[in-house]
């Protein structure tokens, strides 16, 4: 009996001891990048709801993903800070030595802190955040580590917001672009809404990696001349003829890459709008697709988002600088005035000058950046537009996708070919600068990045 009693007592003591131990956190859950992919998608959805213009959306992506990167960085010793590499970014808060942190949680906190502040519908992120953080509590993260990680992520987010507040964005709010010239060849508002041109002073925004907005100024476009035989007339007729003879595949391509955040519709006396993802948002989603296919870990996924966002943001700054210097007239205006008053492009003409093609610039810049991370022949299926009722498309490389995105603007009837080809050159230079100048890995080279991706 004594032996049985003591055996029973020992069992009780062991059971109590186990129940009093802290539950070990599920490390797989803590470092799962899917929660970051979901958070980026949420930010995209909020920006679609808020109808952010393409340049403004690119700014939000850039600051949010940079914050995520910097907050995650201390947990990955082979990576290095973007401070000192991006314009005026310095003095990033550091974690307290000797203290334990959950850096993926800090990264999410930083990302959502910045995203909430830079968008209008912050309440939608407020509703989303608790669901994200609950995953870490459910995974068994120690309460003190949880609180410390949240505080660190918020500190990073506030630092990035301070930096963002100095980029000139506030100073250019509310400035309208008023057409004050009747000079032939200059941009005029286009149907159906005849909106003012958006973001005419975007060139004043501080770049991220570029030395200046005009660092990669494209070639001067053809002289405006509607006489038959002129270069400009030939370029215009190319748009006109393409629009009248589109194949089913060309129409599909144009629609897939439309990415117009605000499309106006007229039905009788009623006018309404539909919302879609921005061009930059489309490439951010491609970054997510690539990261998931490559089974990229949390750090590689955040690195990808940050670098692609920087390339896209600087691409828009570079592109918009030339748009308002050239003030190029859109094909729709020229064709309706001089060739065919009833001609309508397949896609609705965006409300800003024509040259160069923003899709060509930012798609090429993003493709160069993604190629540096995942390799030349990275095949994938792009399902970005499925939520907007379009079928997914397959690509053998990021460059193939960028080529298709670029030529889609000719099929859509909204760009002349020089805006596309020269825009691709400009985008390639922007992308190559980001890849060569911004080093995320210690002792990093482009070859090493691709090797890591493989």
Image (cartoon, helix red, strand yellow):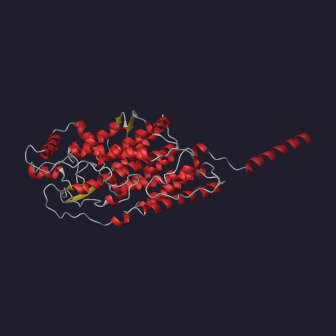
**Residue 298, position in %: x, y?**
52, 45
Can I make out residue 299 in this image? yes
Of 57 and 98, the residue lying toward us: 98
Q: Is residue 128 left or right of residue 286?
A: right
Q: Is residue 90 left or right of residue 377?
A: right
Q: Is residue 276 left or right of residue 299?
A: left
**Residue 352, position in %: x, y?**
24, 56
**Residue 132, position in %: x, y?**
52, 52
**Residue 447, position in %: x, y?**
46, 36
Number of on-image labels: 0
Tell which residue pokes out farthest to the right in this image.
Answer: 2
Can I make out residue 262 in this image? no
Of 118 and 140, the residue lying toward us: 118
Q: Is residue 318 left or right of residue 334?
A: right
Of 210 and 244, the residue lying toward us: 210
**For residue 236, what is the image quadrant?**
top left
The residue that appears at 20% across and 53% down in the rendered structure is 328
**For residue 168, what is the image quadrant?**
bottom left
Tell which residue pokes out farthest to the left in this image.
Answer: 228
The residue that appears at 61% across and 55% down in the rendered structure is 146
The residue that appears at 40% across and 38% down in the rendered structure is 371
Q: Quadrant of the N terminus?
A: top right
């Amino acid at each position: 009996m004594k032996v049985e009693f003591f055996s029973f007592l020992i069992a009780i003591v062991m059971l109590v001891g186990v129940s009093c131990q802290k539950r070990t956190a599920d490390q797989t859950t803590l470092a799962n990048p899917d929660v970051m992919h979901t958070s980026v998608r949420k930010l995209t959805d909020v920006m679609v709801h808020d109808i952010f213009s393409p340049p403004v959306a690119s700014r939000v992506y850039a600051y949010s993903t940079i914050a995520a990167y910097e907050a995650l960085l201390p947990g990955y010793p082979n990576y290095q800070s973007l401070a000192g590499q991006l314009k005026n970014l310095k003095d990033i808060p550091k974690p307290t030595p000797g203290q334990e942190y959950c850096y993926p949680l800090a990264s999410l906190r930083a990302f959502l802190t910045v995203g909430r502040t830079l968008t209008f519908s912050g309440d939608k992120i407020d509703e989303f955040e608790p669901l994200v953080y609950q995953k870490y509590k459910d995974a068994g993260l120690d309460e003190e580590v949880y609180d410390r990680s949240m505080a660190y992520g918020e500190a990073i987010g506030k630092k990035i917001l301070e930096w963002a507040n100095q980029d000139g964005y506030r100073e250019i709010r509310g400035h309208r672009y008023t057409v004050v010239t009747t000079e032939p060849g200059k941009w005029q508002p286009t149907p159906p809404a005849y909106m003012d041109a958006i973001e005419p002073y975007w060139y004043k925004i501080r770049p991220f990696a570029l030395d200046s907005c005009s660092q990669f100024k494209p070639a001067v476009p053809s002289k405006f001349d509607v006489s038959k035989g002129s270069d400009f007339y030939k370029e215009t007729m190319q748009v006109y003829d393409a629009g009248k003879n589109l194949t089913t595949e060309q129409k599909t391509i144009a629609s897939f890459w439309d990415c117009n955040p605000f499309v106006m519709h007229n039905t009788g006396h009623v006018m309404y709008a539909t919302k879609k993802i921005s061009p930059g948002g489309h490439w951010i989603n491609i970054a997510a697709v690539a990261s998931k296919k490559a089974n990229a870990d949390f750090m590689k996924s955040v690195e990808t988002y940050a670098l692609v966002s920087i390339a896209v943001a600087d691409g828009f700054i570079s592109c918009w600088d030339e748009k308002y210097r050239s003030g190029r007239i859109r094909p729709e205006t020229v064709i309706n005035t001089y060739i065919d008053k009833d001609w309508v492009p397949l896609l609705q003409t965006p409300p800003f000058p024509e040259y160069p093609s923003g899709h060509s610039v930012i798609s090429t810049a993003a493709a160069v950046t993604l190629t540096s991370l995942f390799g030349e022949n990275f095949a994938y299926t792009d399902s970005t537009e499925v939520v907007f009722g379009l079928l997914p498309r397959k690509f053998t490389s990021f460059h193939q996708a960028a080529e298709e995105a670029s030529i889609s603007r000719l099929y859509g009837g909204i760009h002349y070919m020089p805006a596309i080809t020269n825009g691709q050159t400009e985008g390639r230079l922007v992308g190559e600068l980001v890849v060569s100048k911004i080093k995320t890995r210690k002792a990093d080279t482009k070859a090493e990045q691709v090797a890591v991706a493989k």
